Amino acid sequence: MTYQAFTWRAVLIGVVLSIVVCMYSAYAGLKVGGVYWPIITATIMSFALLKIFGGTNKNEVNVAATAASTGGLLAAGIIFTVPAIWLLGLPISVFEITFIAIVGGLLGVLFTVPLRTEMIERLKLPYPDGTATAKVLEAGDEGGKKAKMIFGMFGLAGLFTIVRDYFHMFPSFFNLTSLKAIGSKYFSFGSSISLVPFAGGFLIGLKFTGIWFAGAVVSYFAIAPALVSFGFFPDKFVAIMTVTKPFGIGVIIGASVVYFFVRGLPAFKPMLKNIGGGEKTRKWWFVILIVFVALLSIALRLNVFIAIISIFGAFLVSYIAARITGEINIDPMEVFAMAILIIVLLFVQLDPIIAVTLAAILCISAGMAGDFMQDLKAGFLVKTKPNDQIKSQIISVFSSGIVIGIILLALDQMYKIGSVDLPAPQAVALAAIVSAGGISQYLVWGAILGGILTLISIYFKQGIVPIAFGIGLYAPIELSFPLFVGGLFRYYANRKGWTEKGQLIAAGFIGGEGFIGVLLALLGMFGII
C-alpha cells in the first residue's frame, strides 16, 4: 500500500505540539513528580490539526504524534534531575541544559531503534498506551468529539491559571499554617489550588495515589506530631526537615536500587545478542558512540571515563526502560538513573554538577526509550514505516531540547523550583544523593525499609509502589491530598464507565494549566508582563 506519512505538515505539527507538550509536562512534572504518557493526547490533537490542512491518514497522524509526544518524556528527564543543581546552590547555563537534553534524547533514540524487532515483533510486548493509540488511529475521531473535549478543557484550565497566577484572585495553595488553625504547630494539612494534581491523580489511579497519601499521613499526622509532642523538636517544620524528609528520600533510594537489581538487570541479559544488523551496522554504532563520548568530554568537560560510563549507562537504562514499559506501561526512568548514580558514587567521587549531568543523561535516555517504543508499537500495528517515525522523533528531540532550558529557567524564576508551588520531588531526592551532607541515619534507615518493601512488593507483583510511599513521606501534603482525591475520582469513574471521558478532561486540564503556567513564566522572564 502506498501512502504519504512523513510530510512537511506532519513534521511541522509534530514539532509545534512537541514544544507545547514539553512546556506543560515540565510544569506538571515539577508540580506532581510525574509525567503522563502523552501519546494518546498527542494523537488526538494531531488528528484535529492535520484535518485543518485537508485529508489525512492514520500513518501521517502517527508520524506527527510520534514527534509530538517526544517533548513530554524529554522534559521529564530534565525536570527530574537538572533542578538538583540549583537546589545544591550551583550554576548551570541554558546551553548546558539544552546540550544534555539533546544528547540524552538522541542516545535514547539510538539505543531504542534496534529493540523494535526484538520487543515488538518477536516478544510481542503489549505497550498498552501504544496499543490504545493504534485503536485511536484506526477508529479516528468521528466528529472531532475527543479533540473538542481536550481543547475545551485546555482552554478552561488556561483561564483558571490566568485568574490565579496573573490576576492573583486566589492563592496557589492553603494549609493549616496559612489559615492560622489550631494544631498547626503539630499537624500539616492543606491542598494545592491547582487542577494539575487533581487531574494527575485521576490519570495515575487510586493504587499509587492511595499509597502516596498513606506516606503523607504517616509523615504529617503521625511521625512529625509525635516528635514535637515528646519534645524532640520545637515544631513540625524542624521535625519534617530533620527526620521525615530524609527518611522518605531514603525509602526512594533503597527501593530504586533493589528494583534495579531485581527487575532491571535481568531484563538486560539478552540485549547484546539481540542488537544485530550485521558487521557493518556494528561498526557504524562504534563510530557514533565515539562521537558521543567526544561530545560529552568537550562540551560538558567530562573526563573520558565518565563520558564512557554515561554512554554505557544510557545503553543499559534504555533497554531496561523499553522492556519494562512494554510489560507494565510504567517507565521508572528516574529510578534507574538514581540507582546507577548511587552505584557509580560508591566507586568514584564525582563533582556534584557532573553527577547530576550523568543522572540527567541516563534519565532522558530511559524516558525516550519508553516513549519511542510506545510510538513504534502503535506504528507497527497500523503499518507505519519505522524510518518515518525515527526521522520525526529525531527532529523533535532537537526542537524540544532547544526550548527546555529556557522553560526551566522561567519556571524557577516565577514559581521557585523546590517550593510548595513546584515541589520537584525527584530533583530534591537527587540533590540529597549527590550532597555528601545529605546522608543521615534517617536516610539510611529509610533506604533499608525501602529495599525491604520493594522486595515484598515485587513478590506480590506490585512493582515499584514503595516509591510512591517514599514520595508521600517527604513531598508537601498540599500536593499529596489533591492527588489522592483525583485517584478517588478515578475509582468512581471506573465504576460508572466514565474513564475515557475523565482521561480526556484530565489531559486537557494538565495541558492547559501547564502551558499557560509556563507561558506566564516566559512572559515574566522577558519583562513582557
Image (tube, helix red, strand yellow):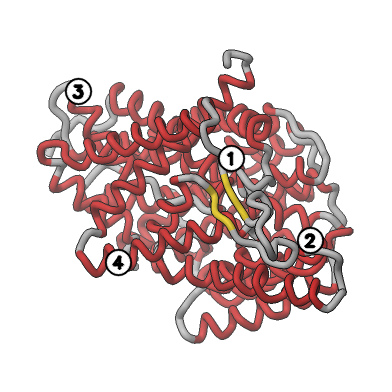
> Going from the N terminus, do you reach mark 3 or mark 1 first?
3
Q: Is residue 322 above or below residue 459?
A: above
The residue tagged 4 is 492
- Which amino acid, by three-letter code, is at mark 3? Ile
Q: Which residue is mark 3?
A: 52
Position of residue 307 in the picture relative to residue 311 (left or right): right
Which type of secondary structure does the marked residue at label 3 adopt?
helix
- Residue appearing at x 20%, y 45% in the figure: 137
3 and 4 marks in contact (CB < 8 Å): no
Q: Looking at this view, is 330 or 368 the one in front?
A: 330
**Where the C terminus falls, by quadrant?**
top right
Give the number of the mark in front: 2 or 1: 2
* Residue at disc 1, secondary structure: helix
Q: Nearer the viewer, mark 3 or mark 4?
A: 4
Counting residues from the N terminus, which is met first, the one under dot 3 or under dot 2?
3
Taking the spot 43% from the left edge, 31% from the top edge, the residue there is 20
Q: CA distance from mark 2 to mark 4?
A: 36 Å
Q: Amino acid at mark 2?
A: Met
Query: Looking at the image, is 285 positioned above or below residue 460?
Result: above
Q: Earlier in the sequence, mark 4 or mark 1?
A: 1
Q: How far apart are the two marked residues, 4 and 1, measured between alpha carbons?
A: 50 Å
Expressed as whole percent of the image width and height from the top left, the position of residue 198 reads 43, 53
- Residue 464 seen in this snapshot: no
What is the secondary structure assignment of the residue under circle 2?
helix
Between marks 4 and 1 in the image, the one whose residue lies nearer the viewer: 4
- Identify residue for label 1: 288
Identify the element where label 4 is drawn.
helix
Q: Would you say the residues marked 3 and 1 are in contact, meaning their CB atoms lie under 8 Å apart? A: no
Asked if the residues shown at circle 4 and circle 1 are in contact, with their CB atoms under 8 angstroms apart, the answer is: no
Tell which circle, 2 or 1, labels the residue nearer the N-terminal end: 2
Which residue in the protein does label 2 denote?
Answer: 241
Mark 2 vs mark 4: which is more N-terminal? Answer: 2
